[in-house]
Every structure is written in structure tokens, then in C-alpha cells.
Amino acid sequence: MQLRQKISKTSAVLLSALLVGAFGTAGHYSRLLPEQITAVSGEQLKIAEYPEISCCGYPVGSDRAALSLFGVLPVKSVQVSRSEPLMLVASGRPFGIKLLMKGVMVTELGDVEDKNGESVCPAAEAGIETGDVVCLAGGEEISSNSRLQSIIAESGGEGIPLRVSRGGDEFDTVLQPVWSERSGCWRGGMWVRDSIAGIGTMTFVNKATGEFAGLGHPVCDCDTGEIVPVSSGEAVPVEITGAKKGERGIPGELLGTFTRNGCYGTLNRNNSCGVYGRLSPEALSELDGEELPMAYPSEITTGEAEMIASVSGGAPERYSVHIERIDYNSGDETKNMVIRMTDSRLIETTGGIVQGMSGSPLIQNGKLIGAVTHVFVADPTRGYAVFAENMTKSLA
């Protein structure tokens, strides 16, 4: 009798441990899996990275599906949408970025010595901070540093109504210029920037519309770190002359110059997932690169992939990379994958991921899965990548 009781108790303990372990595993998968899935129309709903997860319930007409572990243990309910695969030309071609800001960005505040010898900062007293964008001054739209300085210089000391944007919200204030004995003019106590330029990589082109996207992350002001608001811009050809190799603790960069003539097209958007624009008819007619279906995040797996990039001035080439991790629920929509460069040719030339390579498209199983976005400063062979789907959400 005692032996039977011991066996019963032992069985109960083992069963309890198994149940705790199973539900713990289910909770683990629930945290890893996405909250919503986009699947190709007509194909079975699955997550390639986790073949042990299956869809155990997807009622007709519903936009939600139940996921389970091995078809037995419920894991998570997710929102589902169906879509036809978008066809995009994977580019990998470097291009020059010229952006004119919508307004002018405040990059620095400074004191002005007034006629009494006291130091004051009119901009700070008006509530302006570094990173703010001045949109209107005296009721006039501002698009250049020189125009704002002219309005301040011509104010005669009268208060200037300003409309300022900060973090997407706008507010009105009044700038009270101060006469500077040292410079002999009215000053506002702030330095501003009205344009920005750099080099990036074109990720893809939609041949049907001429729209293109690049970088995979926003163009930010180098002083403030704020996303640059775009009024207009150009995508221009560049000549890559070489690369400064990245080292541990020291990011590398592609070296190049803007060509004097030519223009790929216009730039009209700059947001968290890259820069966007439209190719000119001439550039679209000369477009090269392979047209591929875009992969949804649920189709991507860790393992081998390829990156298309031009790092030595020639045509874009394919380089081997390894996808180490996929994060469906990243708080940063440009850091969805961790990648590692494995191609010895690339590592010999650049040391790994370098500045200017952002936007280089990633290919897996014949589909465009994303683009390189960031390098790990401590290890230039590794970095982050963005899902291609995130970049396509900003297409018109």
C-alpha cells in the first residue's frame, strides 16, 4: 500500500513538473512570436523560424488565428492579414542624398552679450531647445538659415512670432532679439541648419510606380540626433573610391564623392524606416538589378542569406551573411534582425558593415527580406537589419 502511494505521489509530481514546463514553454513562445502576421494569399499560415508552431484555428471570415505548439498546446492568438507578394527590384547601388529641410533645425543655443554687458539667450528665453524646428517666423515659412537671420537682423528689436515643431507637436512663441555690441546686429542666440547631405544605399525600386527606398533608417541631424524633416531633396549618383575599414570601436565608412552631373530622382520622405523618393523616367529605364518577391517576416529564418552591396566602385555584388536572430517584437522597427557578415571578400575590403552601407538589401530563398541598418561598434562584422515589410509600409 505504501509503495503504491509513493508511486502515485511520484507520478503526480512528475505530471505537475511536465505541465509547469509545458506552460512555461508556451509562455516563452508567446513572448517570441509576433502580435500580427502577414501571410501570402492562398498559402498555409506558418512561421518559418518556428516550424514547431502551427495554426490550430483560423475561422472563416476571421482576422485572428490561434497558434499552438506541435498542434497540441495553445500558445497565442495573433492578428492575420493576407496579401499578394510585392515585386521589387533589389538594388544595392550607393547614392547621394541631398535634403532641404522643412523649416530650419536648431542645432545649438548660445548667449548674446547685450549693450549692458550681460549674457542672455533670446532663443532659450522663448522656450526653444536644441533639436526644435522653426517653421514660421513673422508669419513667413522658413526654409533657409539665411532668411531666418535676415528676419532677426531686420526686426529692429521687435518681438518675432515663431511657430516651432518639437517631436511632431507645434507651438507658438515669441523671440525677443537682443542687440549685440560685439557683432553690431540683432541676434537670436541660436544656430540653425537648413540642409543635409550624405551617402547611403538604395534598397529597392518598385518598377510599377518608380518609387524607391534606401537606408532602412532615418537621416538624422548629426548634432541633435533628431530626424530631419524634408521639404524636398534629390537622389544623385556617387562615385565610390574605396572604403575605410571598420575596426573594433571605430566604425568604417564608404569613401566617395557626388558626381557633378546626373540625378536619379527626387526625395520626398524621411522617416524611421528610411528615405523615399521617385526615380526619373530616364533612371527607371536604365534600372538594373533582379526583381524579387518581398518576404514577409513570417517567412524569414535564422541562417544563411546574402547582401547586395557596392563597396569598391563597381556594380553591386552579392556577399554571404548569416542571420543570427529575428526579433518580431523589437521596440525599434529598424532593428528586427541581428546579422553577421561571413564573406571573406567583404571583410577584407571593409572589415564588415560600414557607414554608407545602410540600406543594402538582404536576400534569402530568392526573396527580399530586409536591409542592413546599423553596425555594432564593438564588432563591425555584426549589426542590425530591418524587415523589408517595414520599409514598404511607407510606399504610396
Image (cartoon, rainbow, N blue to C red):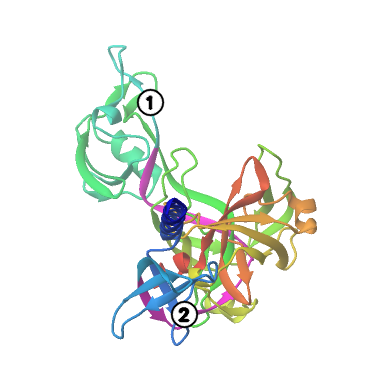
Q: Main secondary structure of the magenta part?
A: strand
Relative horizontal placement of residue 317, taking residue 337 as reference (left or right): right
At numbered mark 1, what does the secondary structure look like: helix, strand or loop?
A: loop
Q: Nearer the viewer, residue 62 or 357?
A: 62
Task: Tell me if 330 is positioned left or right of 119 in this view.
Answer: right
370 displayed left or right of 105: right
Q: Is residue 33 above or below residue 396?
A: above
Tell me the residue at 51%/77% (across/down).
206
Q: CA distance from mark 1 to mark 2?
A: 46 Å
Q: Position of residue 186 (x, y in %)?
A: 31, 28
Q: Which residues are magenta?
A: 79-106
- Residue 110, which numbered label? 1
Residue under the point 75% across and 56% down: 346
Label 2 belongs to which residue? 209
Q: Is residue 317 magenta?
A: no
Q: Residue at x 71, y 41 (%)?
A: 247
The answer to which of 315 and 360 lies nearer the viewer is 360
Q: Residues within 10 Å of mark 2 (few under 14, many from 20)?
A: few
- The three-letter amino acid code for the residue at tag 2 is Thr
Q: Callout 1, which amino acid?
A: Gly
Residue 55, quarter of picture: bottom left
Q: Which mark is residue 165?
A: none
Whether residue 23 can be seen here? yes
Q: Quadrant of residue 159?
A: top left
The reply to whether the magenta stretch includes residue 105 is yes
